[in-house]
Image: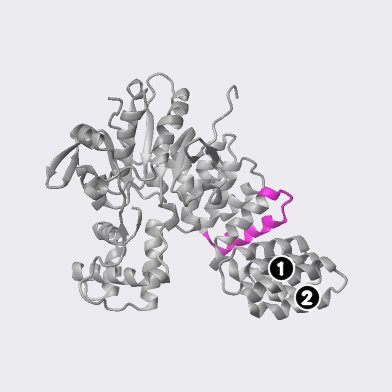
Amino acid sequence: MGLVKAKIRKTKTGSGASDDMVGLSAALQAADPAERRSAARRLGSTTGCEAALLDRLAFEHEASVREMLVLSLMQLGTQDAVRGLAEHLRSEDASLRNAVVEALEAMPDAVAPNIELLLADHDPDVRIFACNLLVGLAHPDVPKWLSHVLENDSHVNVCAAAVDALTEIGRPDCVPALRACARRFPEEPFLSFAIDVAIARAAEQ
Amino acid sequence: MSALASEGQGAEGPPHPLSDEELAKFSEFFYRKTGIRLDERKRYYMERRIVERIRRTGCRSFFEYFTTLKLNGAAGELEALINEMTVNETYFWRENYQFECMTRSMLDEIARRKRPGEPIRIWSIPCSTGEEPYTIAIHILEYWARADSYDIEIFASDIDSNVLKRARDGTYDERSLSRLPPQLRARYFKLVSERRWQVINELRSSIAFGSVNLSDPLETARYRQIDLIFCRNLLIYFDDVSRRLAAENMFEAMSPGGFICLGHSESMSRITNLFRPRQFAEALVYQKPAPSRGA
């Protein structure tokens, strides 16, 4: 018959010079995407290599390598990794921003200490992406953070992002902040409409 | 490994309760070793099984057991613990439409990419007690007309060493075999005791069984140039990071153009963008992109 018994290869362990951090960091710049991907994968279990991974992430355009860079930073899960990833929320590259949002969503404990800083960023786009990120962040303080945005942020589009988020995950105790936001922007009919929807959803919870 | 352990197995008598801190430490350790997240909702059976392992190892406290477990020399205990924490329930011909997709669509496409003499490699992970890899083998032999024209290698892996022993032995009861057409039972099994059937030697010896943790890149590095992976109902037990890591490890293990079949409630698109969905007449599967022809 066509079935033949396969042989399972022996696992290679540390493979010499290229396994050190310097060698692997250099390999992140290799011309071959497979080599860059392999280096990124190995650096995911190497403490202290966040900067090398983040530097490459800024320039990497090969999707499979980018995914590996992001995953390695998620594996490291350090504050350096989180802050470095969050910096890419400023990127003009929408796919990189989305990858960063998805990665940060999956690291709630590590991300939580950075949320207030992100929501206070000088760039309203970063604050909007931070609100987007909160929708998928499994953390008990999410409604509190979003309510704070509604009560304090001066930019209508940031508040709109927070309203969108609370439409998904709002609770009855968010309703006062939603009403306060409506009062702060009386000239924005689209926001009033969105707030009415969010309040109705929150009341259903 | 197809699910976490069910109730009713393990400890004799009521468990000694463990503190929140002890359970949190244990959960973190187990997660790092397996990629499986044991949260508060699974507290009851987690506690029962830890207490059972403490009793069987003769340790006098959780602290003593946990310290033993963390030592490198306690690899055997880690294996016993993983076996205790997982259950393995499956049967022949489960979610059969994917096997039909394999023999009617995927294998022909895989074969078109093969050079003469190059094997076709299929990986069943988690293979549990062997029903899935044997189903794959029987389907190919019965329903893929070109089976004799290729060397076909089937790898079967699980993190649980106990189920691997049972898979190698290949002996099943009526429940496991209930969906298998009777003529195939007659062809590929022999009756070994009352209502117990064993896979024939020729088939058992053709499958390469091995222990693998899918979220560990060192362990998965032993598997390369895989053309088709069946990874069904495993990723749902991983957290986001482990799930992505498992997907990356499968990506590394696969040949360009290779396929992955997931469980019916799972979606690779929610885990990573590395693979492309492929809708065949029989099933939706996921494919590792292949370089375009002429590139």
| Residue drawn at x 33%, y 68% as measured from the top left | B46
Q: Amino acid at mark 2?
A: Cys
Depth check: B67 or B233 in front? B233
Frontmost residue, A75 versus A167: A167
B55 shown above or below B294: below
Q: Which residue is mark 1?
A: A162
Alpha carbon distance from label 1 to label 2? 10 Å
Which residue is the extreme one toward the left? B193
Q: Which mark is residue A181?
A: 2
Q: Position of residue A16 (x, y in %)?
A: 42, 41
Q: Is residue A142 above or below residue B269?
A: below
Res. B132 image quadrant: top left
Any part of residue B227 in sight: no
Q: Are marks 1 and 2 in contact (CB under 8 Å)?
A: yes
Helix, strand or loop at disc 1?
Answer: helix
Q: Which residues are magenta?
A: A77-95
On whether residue A88 falls in the magenta region, the answer is yes
> For residue B65: magenta?
no
Horizontal side, residue A41 vs residue B137: left or right? right
Left or right, residue B253 beside residue A172? left
Residue B3 seen from this side: yes
